[in-house]
Image (tube, coloured by chain):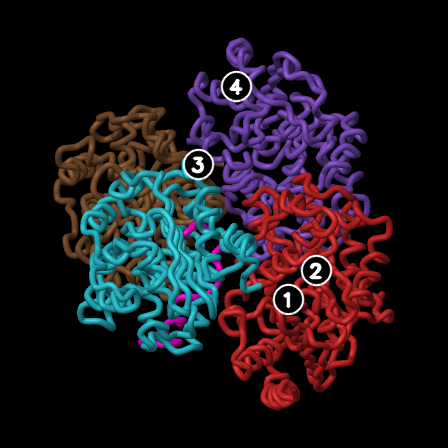
Chain colours: A cyan, B red, C purple, D brown
Amino acid sequence: MTAYQDIIEKIALEVKPLLQEGKVATYIPALSRISPEKFGMSVATVKGELFTIGDADEKFSIQSISKVFTLAMIMDRIGDALWERVGREASGNPFNSLIQLEYENGKPRNPFINAGALIVTDLMILENKDPLQDLLGFVRKCANNPEIGFDAEVALSEKMTGHRNAALASFLKSYGNLVNEVERVLDIYFHQCSLSMSCVDLSRAFLFLANGGTDPRSGKMICGPRQAKRINALMQTCGLYDECGEFAYRVGLPGKSGVGGGIVAVMPGELVLTVWSPGLNPSGNSLAGMKALELFTTYTARSIF
Amino acid sequence: MTAYQDIIEKIALEVKPLLQEGKVATYIPALSRISPEKFGMSVATVKGELFTIGDADEKFSIQSISKVFTLAMIMDRIGDALWERVGREASGNPFNSLIQLEYENGKPRNPFINAGALIVTDLMILENKDPLQDLLGFVRKCANNPEIGFDAEVALSEKMTGHRNAALASFLKSYGNLVNEVERVLDIYFHQCSLSMSCVDLSRAFLFLANGGTDPRSGKMICGPRQAKRINALMQTCGLYDECGEFAYRVGLPGKSGVGGGIVAVMPGELVLTVWSPGLNPSGNSLAGMKALELFTTYTARSIF
Amino acid sequence: MTAYQDIIEKIALEVKPLLQEGKVATYIPALSRISPEKFGMSVATVKGELFTIGDADEKFSIQSISKVFTLAMIMDRIGDALWERVGREASGNPFNSLIQLEYENGKPRNPFINAGALIVTDLMILENKDPLQDLLGFVRKCANNPEIGFDAEVALSEKMTGHRNAALASFLKSYGNLVNEVERVLDIYFHQCSLSMSCVDLSRAFLFLANGGTDPRSGKMICGPRQAKRINALMQTCGLYDECGEFAYRVGLPGKSGVGGGIVAVMPGELVLTVWSPGLNPSGNSLAGMKALELFTTYTARSIF
Amino acid sequence: MTAYQDIIEKIALEVKPLLQEGKVATYIPALSRISPEKFGMSVATVKGELFTIGDADEKFSIQSISKVFTLAMIMDRIGDALWERVGREASGNPFNSLIQLEYENGKPRNPFINAGALIVTDLMILENKDPLQDLLGFVRKCANNPEIGFDAEVALSEKMTGHRNAALASFLKSYGNLVNEVERVLDIYFHQCSLSMSCVDLSRAFLFLANGGTDPRSGKMICGPRQAKRINALMQTCGLYDECGEFAYRVGLPGKSGVGGGIVAVMPGELVLTVWSPGLNPSGNSLAGMKALELFTTYTARSIF
């Protein structure tokens, strides 16, 4: 079916004028140098098709999208024990807010806001001898691409400027909700955020979530079908910071965004859709990317609703 | 297919021990007299099938479930103009909180928390000469049941004790986000919440949302397909107070609950599922009802994710 | 001693350029018509001296300054029982905020924010057959002026626009922290705020607080010495909305302000100082009035610190 | 005058039963070993008299009381420039809360909550080559005791467990409101809190604040008279965490407390009163100490009000 190719080509044209409207993230110096003109999109279906447009093969910093990988690894490892340390409700606050954390005595709202992701990283360190190497192995397996790696420069850049995340980690520690040392957790966290992947990599790596937990190409089970549904539900509820409702309303798919400008969306049973455009809206989500995804579900008349 | 009948019978047995664990809402005196032993469940499919168990034909106070009806009416009437006065993000706070309203200068987070629903009621008064009569007509049409009505005793009971809602309405008024008089808005609001319907009524009345906006029995279009998707998305995001994430995780369907103990859930393209059990959990959602819905999606292995 | 006369004359000249900088309160229509050019100041000493400048004899709406009178009446009547229903800490929030009230389950921070003053009014109704008449009697006695009265037009004007106060009262009621009907409490509250008094009236009426509870002219005890100290302490802590710290730092006296532009300050053992200038700063305190009081304690090198 | 001696002896007897009611701070391990039976009190007058009772000569960890010394040093050095980085209003929140800091974009409410004190420490580092040595010199001069020193064990103990302060410092840094490195600021901060002084030391060291800025014994000016008043005003407004109103109401003097169980109170023009009792109330203030100070102002019938 070439239908998806036509659609993403049409979308690429339509969102072109929006590329200049977003604002590239500047708080991580290494990210601020990316051109806002970049735009890529890719669709991978459970049947094995792949459709791409623009810079779909160029690697970018996936940032918070990495939270889905670490969450999948930890849910597989410790199951519901995770929920003793982190909730699963939308936060209704910016991704790096400390307010709710204090009101709720150090239990982050969900694993996709930064505080919650730090808990997941803390667990990764407890459960894996070499958490970064294991994460890399997992992502490479999901994406079927052994060349995926971390971007050391980005990781270092975040470390130098990540005072807000340092505050979150120390705050969690003060509540007894962080086992490892703050320094260690931050180091792993900044590295995982620095994963460098392309739209094609991400579309492929997320296919197991569109296919009941099993990679449709290799036939390998990445997680159980129930776990896959739950991860999709969590993305739906809290994958786009304080724009989850907006995303559900306009796009209607579970998804996860990162400040690098990437957004991945899952249509269960069918496909994974990834878009990359570095210019962000005030909520920290790719401005043109949001529009591209909205157009896709409008043109295909498909959504989970 | 009798499969659904077997499943709901099995579920009814399983949740029986939970009926005593919930707490019947006491803040509305007329509701506090309902027996916590009541339990009903009904499934209506887009193909016209109906499956019921227990007290599925007994009328109860649908309370906040009515917010879906008024929202559907107003979205149909004024479209996106609605979003100038109310947002569409999860609130992460109890349904009657005033905190976020103040931080966000009188714009409620979404149309399903009380403050947002009062805005919708305000619009109902502006757009309809006789809002209650029009609402009744709409609900009767959706449910195909001309006997549905308001429960005057419940409406009065809420009025006498609804100081929190009065606070919300006055607060909205102080921000200039309420056009009509506080008294008038509250009067209509308490009446709409007092709608008395059975599980069967609700399953039928919500079928248009499972069928792209069109009632599958009558063939009448209640709203456009895009509108139906959006209402489902809004229920997914904010239909269960501060348990939306929990509901997405455990049940995986768009849904709306009320403090009368009812919950309606929509499986797009397939069916509507309604459960009623008056005992509530601390978040104000039916305790056994939540479990019943979770079991349904587990046993059928179906959800939107 | 003519020293005070010289000082207030000097001050009147100095603050003249500031009169245009403040913004007359517009949310009460009847107040918005007052000229921002008005300026009055009066000093009454415990020895019986009186010094005045400008419009010190013109009556204005004392608004929140009335909260000191009702508090003094209720503390005298019910003593420490008051503190079961209201706290005595600075709020750190605007005078009409509902946020803290919700976080603290309906117990207002102190009797000088609006929520706390509504509690005091509720108690006034419980303790007095005719609370407004009794208040009037009390104020006339304190000020030794039988002509002091309410301004019915202002009271009505507040009632028509006082949605925020209505929200506060309903909110208190929802927490069970308001005994009388919301309507009744608001009616009394808006009337008490409409008290019309001059700088001279206020300086005289507050003299008992500078003199250990006893009116130095009549020799009548208005309250005990300990009570007088406590009322001064409460004014110091919470008399100027969210500028109490600013006022302590710059002026260094217990004081109470109103949105009518009046501020009364007490120098225990010595004098009462009242200033009136209708232009307000963003916190709702008289802009020129704040400066005038600061200059007074600077020029006299006197403060409680 | 032996009057004060009689009074503090009477007070020591009266508060004895309260010593067991407080809870010694446990979050700093080195403090948790102090016996709750300790009780000391001392009065130093501007005329040179000294009255003591109990353990008034035993050194204890002054903790937050040190914030008055660093504030006095910095106000003297940079004047009103301080207020660009920190406010001067009561916080109405616990001393280590991060909530207000986020709502107010990284500007702490006042210099006596931990966040504000960290700003002062940051300035100390900028303004002094050897901030700890300079602080020590200042305190020794004020107290006229060259043997005052830091308690290295306490400082280390705080560092190991001070995750909340680390969170505050990183949070300030993320807002650009901290110039030096987080590690460095915390190191100085924990040391300054570890100052070890007796009641007598503190009463003497604070005498300049009761005497218009000049040490009455040595005749040396520590700060100007206006500065002394302002520091007293700041202590009045924000010296006792979230019990400032309580302290003003019950005691009626400017004061500063520490979690080591010490409280210093200033009666301008007359005396300084210090009490030490390690058992704390839930707000972190010495339980018996609060009572002792209240009894003192009751028995002497003196306060600033």
Do the residues at pointers 1 and 2 share their chain?
yes
Which label was assigned to residue C292? Answer: 4
Rate crowding at label 1 as few (under 14), some (14 to 19) or many (20 or more) other CA atoms within 10 Å.
many
In three-dimensional space, the C-alpha distance between marks 1 and 2, rounded to whole angstroms, equals 9 Å
Q: Secondary structure at mark 4?
A: helix
Q: CA distance from mark 4 to mark 3?
A: 50 Å
Q: Dot 2: what SS?
A: helix
Where disc 3 sits, the SS reads loop
Q: Amino acid at mark 3?
A: Glu
Q: Which mark is residue B67?
A: 2
B51 left or right, relative to A155: right
Picture disc at residue A21: 3
Of the two numbered discs 3 and 1 in the rendering, the one whose residue sits closer to the viewer: 3
Return the mark for residue B256.
1
Looking at the rendered structure, whether the residues under marks 3 and 1 are on a common chain is answered as no
Q: Quadrant of the N terminus of chain D?
A: top left
Callout 4 amino acid: Ala
Mark 2 and mark 3: span between their CA atoms? 36 Å
Q: CA distance from mark 1 to mark 4?
A: 58 Å
